[in-house]
Amino acid sequence: MIVTKKLNVGIVVFPGSNCDQDCFYVFDEILKQNVKYIWHKESILGKVDLIVLPGGFSYGDYLRCGAIARFSPVMRSVVEFAESGGYVLGICNGFQILCEAGLLPGALLKNKSLTFICDTVNLRVENNKTFFTSEYNQSEIIRIPIAHGEGRYFADEKTINELEANSQVVLRYCSPDGRVDDDFNPNGSLNNIAGIINERGNVFGLMPHPERASDTILRNVDGRKIFESIIKNFIFR
């Protein structure tokens, strides 16, 4: 069977974005999908099936990470897109923006160490029944880079309990053998949370950078299945 249908991806570019080109490369060069940049001042998304809010330092991370980007003209359209059922992926700074915009619950606080962390961490796939993670095995352990100064996920107790009860915690920091404890929590996130999804299942935010673990030349493709899951579920849904 020959599949000619392709995903139309829009990558939002804010002043200070620095992972937009990495995401573009993965979708364009590696996965051969249709992809375009969307400047933060644009209010029309055009024909897109997926919006990506990439990592970086939007607006220099003044105030709080993502707090200013949340008010960019494009975000009104992104919120409308998500609320109508469109798929949105927020990576690192993109995750922070999604929380600031109210598309995901909680907030990303300064790392417990109060230092910027650049490392490769182990993650456990807590939910492989999502649009974004279906190509992984349940409880699969993967290694993906992180690079952030404000990645400590926080929410009130009620929200945390709801996320856990609804299987909205998608990725969790863990040991190489899947153990979850403080020794393998790089930033102090509550419950070792590394990525969550909204209750509807169409908005996913994560602090690790899957686009930095998608090319064989980097000798790590553990992040590629996030993008492959999206494509497969879009094409065959």
Image (spheres, rainbow, N blue to C red):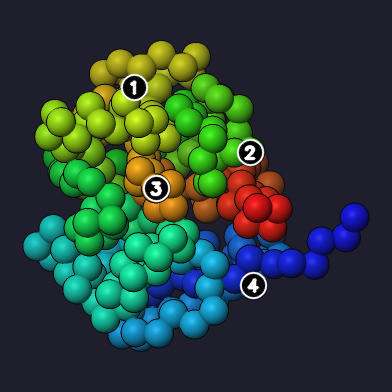
Q: Is residue 213 left or right of residue 148?
A: right
Disc 1 target residue: 184
User: In the drawing, what numbered circle is on residue 200?
Assistant: 3
Q: Could you tell which of marks 1 and 2 lies nearer the N-terminus?
A: 2
Work out how far the residue at label 2 is from the one at label 4, CA to CA, in angstroms.
Answer: 21 Å
The quarter of the picture where residue 15 lies is: bottom left
User: In the drawing, what numbered circle is on residue 192?
Assistant: none
Q: Could you tell which of marks 3 and 1 lies nearer the N-terminus?
A: 1
Question: Eyeballing the image, is 142 above or below 23?
Answer: above
Instruction: Single out the mark in the foreground, 3 or 1.
Output: 3
- Would you say the residues marked 1 and 4 are in contact, meaning their CB atoms lie under 8 Å apart? no
Question: Mark 1: which amino acid?
Answer: Phe
User: In the drawing, what numbered circle is on residue 135?
Assistant: 2
Residue 68 locus on image (x, y percent): 17, 69
Q: Could you tell which of marks 2 and 3 lies nearer the N-terminus?
A: 2
Please tell me which residue lies in front, 17 or 69.
Answer: 69
